Amino acid sequence: MKLNILGCYSATPRTFTNPTSQVLEINNHLFLIDCGEGTQVQLRKHKIKFNRIKHIFISHLHGDHFFGLVGLISTFRLLNREADLHIYAPKGLKEVITLQMKLANSWTNYNLFFHELTSTASELIFEDEKVTVSTIPLDHRVYTNGFLFKEKEGERKLDINAVLNSNIDVAYFRKLKQGFDVKNNNGEIIKNETVTKPANPPKSYAFCSDTAYNESIIPIIKEVDVLYHESTFLEKHKSLAPKTKHSTAKEAAQIAKLSNAGKLILGHYSTRYGDINTFKIEANEFFENVELADDGKFFVF
Amino acid sequence: MKLNILGCYSATPRTFTNPTSQVLEINNHLFLIDCGEGTQVQLRKHKIKFNRIKHIFISHLHGDHFFGLVGLISTFRLLNREADLHIYAPKGLKEVITLQMKLANSWTNYNLFFHELTSTASELIFEDEKVTVSTIPLDHRVYTNGFLFKEKEGERKLDINAVLNSNIDVAYFRKLKQGFDVKNNNGEIIKNETVTKPANPPKSYAFCSDTAYNESIIPIIKEVDVLYHESTFLEKHKSLAPKTKHSTAKEAAQIAKLSNAGKLILGHYSTRYGDINTFKIEANEFFENVELADDGKFFVF
């Protein structure tokens, strides 16, 4: 997986910082997560191939998380996109987008599917052979979901020397990868685990923004490899967090710890703070493996 | 007057070019004209004081002319704006903006007035002591207006030496500026034109984008000092102009010539062209005083 941070600051776009948007590369998908104003310019700057984006996930309908979407949809049209585009977002987004298309008298020449979300329980919203995406209900001022991206268990890997030494016909390789025992050319039963190695462990990524401190997400994101959790504030402004339904860096770290996450990435910083490194220092008191999101930065895991 | 070009390229925002937006400084007003995606970042980059913008004029509801507006309105709220904001735009914009506010459950804490336009004849939409703004009905794929900004005739200026030599009491200075003859301290009638000079000639600016070649605007913009006229295409692609209801550089120059404009500023270039100087070369064959808009450039007149 590769996570490209296009924008990770709260509230308004500024000269050098962008509102929330990320691209997750996972098993040949480019999943776009949130789409603040300026996202299409960030995609160009970071040379991400627009047309490979087929699925867009919108957490909630505050402007800093979706005001760039209508423009991106229009740009896809101008670029003569033909591939289907799927958008997973809170109910209401379809009306916003289609109203603007109607007023402009310009419809997409590709299929645009809205998957409008209303459930307050976690639900599976995307699945293919290799990946699932589920919602993570968050606690914010409007209806908001995070998203949990999980690879499925892959196939076992052949230990090619052991396979050749065991005199197994190539016709059985597929079956070996699927975990079955097979017969070799001498008619002997070969135990699967003697000629294969376990699959790479499936990776997972949880995106949680925007949200107040909310322990009810822990069962959903338990053991996640990488957790992106918003940290709008530092503890010195902790009174603002519950009022605005945001989190502090300490609270993000506590969620990471209670979930036993492999790594915590912080973001959605209030622009009142000059040096974002203070977020890492605060979170590190409660959780060791902390990294800071920043516009243009990417993480491979 | 000072015209700040924030963006002047057609269609989509790109890494180094922005969709349409301009700020016209005129008699202490900052009028924002169109508001493509990224306008608020351009305002910051060019250090234009956000809160001085009290009137926004939107030509039409294609995305490259208004997708930045909802974000700007939100940012004004986050900056605790208190001043009224007036938006002059085609009917439909109010619904787009208020729908998004409703979904975000966040309303402005300042007064937001929508002046929705539907007339296909030129109409006066703003007037104060010193300035008028009228619409210029344009010919585009959706309902579109240009805008004509005109200073009113100012007061005559005192020729202070002549005034002192004529022995006129200071109490009459105001009357002199207003053009009246007055009596001096000796009881003699002093003809106004012997002690005053004409007011500075009132300036005018016409913004015409987007539009097909349309001679019916000429009576409205006749003798305008500065005409901004779109030139999406060059003549070598002139077959595209009527189809998309845009103009070529030659056509913009013809409108400037027929209107007897003082200066023509070209803009709204299609991004298919590498060097915008070709637009000036083409227009110069038909009209002499041509300048090229470009993002970040400003014109004083």
Image (cartoon, coloured by chain):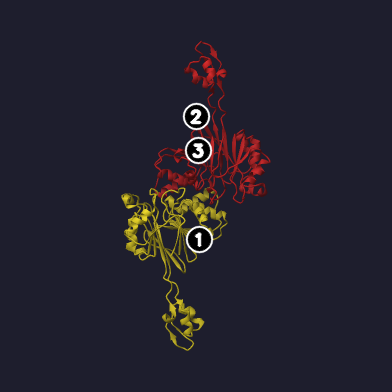
Chain colours: A red, B yellow
* In front of the other: A122 or A129: A129
Pair 3/1: label in front = 3
* In front of the other: A217 or B95: A217
Residue A129 disc label:
2
Image coordinates for residue A64, horizontal then vertical, percent: 54, 48
- Which of pointers 3 and 2 lies earlier in the amino acid sequence? 3
Kind of residue sitting beneath label 2: Glu
Count of all numbered marks drawn on residues in the image = 3
Q: Which residue is the site of mark 1?
A: B54
Q: Residue at x 56, y 16 (%)?
A: A191
Kind of residue sitting beneath label 3: Phe
- The secondary structure type at the circle numbered 1 is strand
Residue A153 disc label:
none
Kind of residue sitting beneath label 1: Lys
Q: Chain of mark 1?
A: B
In this rendering, the answer to whether A138 lies above or below A12 is: above
- The secondary structure type at the circle numbered 3 is strand
Q: Which residue is the site of mark 3?
A: A31
